[in-house]
Amino acid sequence: MIFGTAGHIDHGKTALIKAITGVDADRLKEEKARGITIDLGFAYWPQADGSTIGFVDVPGHERFVSTMMAGAQGVEAALLVVAADDGVMPQTREHVELLALLGVSRGLVALTKADKVDEARLAAVEAEIAALLAPTPLAGSPVYPVSSLTGQGVEALKSALVERHQSHQPRMATRLFRLAVDRAFVLAGAGVVVTGTVLDGVVKVGDRVLVSPSGLEARVRAIHAQNRKSDEGRAGDRCALNLVGEKIEREAIKRGDMILAPEAHAPTRRIDAEVRVAPGAKKGLLQWMPARLHHATAETGCRIVLLEDKAPQAGDLARVQLVLDQPIAAFSGDRFVLRDPSESFTLAGGHLLDLAPPERKRRTPERSGVLDALENADDAAALAALMAVSAAPVSLTAFARMRGLSRAQALPLAGDALLLDDEFLLTVTREAALLAELKAALGAFHADNPDMPGQGLERLRMAIAPRIPAPLFRLLLRRFAARGDVAFEGNFLRLASHKVELSLEDENLWYEIRPRLDAAERFRPPRVRDIANALQEDEAAIRRLLRHCARAGQADEFALDHFLLRHATREAVRLAGELEAAGGPFNAGAFRDALEAASGSAVGRKVAIQILEFFDRHGVTIRRADLRRMNPHRRMLFEPVAPEGEAANNINLGRESSPVGRPDFKSGWGREPVPGGFDSHSLPPSILGG
């Protein structure tokens, strides 16, 4: 069990720990010279049953509150130290407030320097302490008068500590491992050693771990748990880990880092949270207010974004979004504290909810429902509520990582929900509702457009399920098509009962036209007028038929009265992609040469430019001056929709969203707006698939 000291400067915290354990927790030369604690100190008290009680000794000076916070987070009980001659002092009050905001609910009070005062003074200070703790989770904590100098009351306090330790229930170690680093140093003959409290999970000798947020890889060569050599460290232990790795060196790891299981690595700079405004925050919280965030052993600047109309005042409970200056490694449910930028007073404290919230539309009813769902401490209840309120599919991996679970632990929580692409969860109820909306939309479209083979997939998605990314929407459509509810016509979708057939005359005419658009002429097809003259047919009839075939996905009108067969369009996309892969962004001349080499006939620069402009309009290519590059999320636009089970061969289901079109994309490429938006064709990394 880990106890953390708390209390005003010079109230005898370090001396008391030495009287209990025999260990001087002040380890720095300056600390011994000045007689005050400056940095975190640690002491261990072995017990007769082989277990160990650990102590984290924190500074009491107001200048070192941030250091106190680094030590207080992760402790399991508080040892509040109050000097009998001084009584409750400013840092006593502040430390108690911080412990309350961090959720520390168990503790003992040591009334030190009891040998310097009489019984009346002891009684008065005990009453003062009781009044201080009354409105906090530490209310009712027993008080033990002690003297580190004479030994008065120390044995009684030690007995109380042992009793608390023996009745303590160890933390559950079922979540992914992580350790909050409070020290990093080099030990001769061993190398880099980090120390800290294991917040969750289990780590064993030989385990592969990551340093977060930097992402450096390491291996655990040796472990000391509770100051003893061990094969493993568990949640609640004070541990020293000897790390080895290619880039592991003293300067690469600092206080505030997390050592964690690779699955848990997901640093974030934007977090939705629930906070309780501190009593000392006289102005409450304001929109875009600067603050200092203290989480585990990390400290960073941040901005507060209010998620409610009313500015919360002292004592209010509120939801906020925190925009951090530096990324941190965290789990949903972690406690944190916000202080003013000068570290003079505490603004608020609370717990984290969503580690990947949206930058926009932060205050919608759906977002409120998502945060309500994440408030559930029970993981299964949280996931069920999240799926119920989310318009988009829920990422199983992202949810598991946010809650500190492995994928294997999270999968059974999904119950009978659908697992799309082996990753995204959708409830059966939501699937049925989507199918009903889909049928209604297609029925209305067929009624208005009886001569068209079906509705375009992207327009259909935006009409009924804009929050579902295009690749996932297509997976759902394949499920519906496999059941016979709908059917594909090229890149269009129709009700299974809807049929549009060419008349015998049009079908015969199409078989005459098709060869003239194929083979060597496929990239330089004749115009509608030329086809009509060659076949001695009405020009309007040829145009009508070709546009009908374009709507059916058999051809593409890349310029007025100029049509490519769909397989030629796909080939042109492939050639453009090969050009970029071979030499980066390409110009129209290089594209023309590629078309001519593939077809074996002259194409011409004008036609090449027309085809590229057609690609630009559809977002397949992105133009910058005279150069173009491919948009990987639109390359599949002209591909056929594969049957169930063949999605991986035809559709890019990449996990990272494209930076193009976002305000943080700085390269200069792709700033021109493209209809539809590229992000609608990518899968975002948040727990929601949209």
Image (cartoon, rainbow, N blue to C red):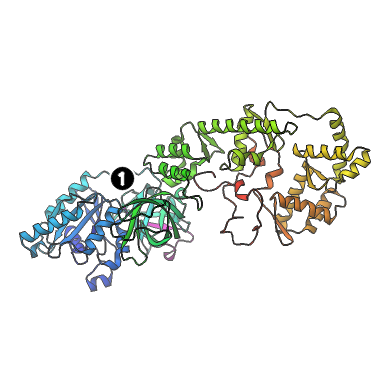
Indicate yes or no whether the magenta region holds residue 240: yes
Give the structural element (helix, strand or loop) at label 1. loop
Q: Is residue 372 left or right of residue 576?
A: left
Kindly identify the amino acid type of the residue bearing the numbered disc 1: Arg
Q: Is residue 513 left or right of residue 155?
A: right
Q: Quadrant of residue 431?
A: top right
Indicate yes or no whether the magenta region holds residue 87: no
The residue lying at 10 percent from left, 56 percent from top is 153
Label 1 sits on residue: 171
Where residue 536 appears, as percent x and y from the top left, is 94, 38
Q: Is residue 190 visible?
A: no
Q: Residue furthest bottom?
A: 33
The part of the chain drawn in magenta is 238-253
Q: Is residue 396 left or right of residue 63?
A: right
Quarter in which the C terminus is drawn: top right
Where residue 184 appears, as percent x and y from the top left, is 37, 62
Q: Quadrant of residue 623?
A: bottom right
Q: Label 1 neighbourhood size at 10 Å, few (<14), some (14-19), many (20+)? A: some
In this view, the residue in front, 334 or 155, is 334
In this view, the residue in front, 556 or 26, is 556
The residue lying at 41 percent from left, 40 percent from top is 382
In this view, the residue in front, 88 or 410, is 88
Q: Is residue 122 visible?
A: yes
Q: Is residue 24 left or right of residue 488?
A: left
In this view, the residue in front, 577 or 355, is 355
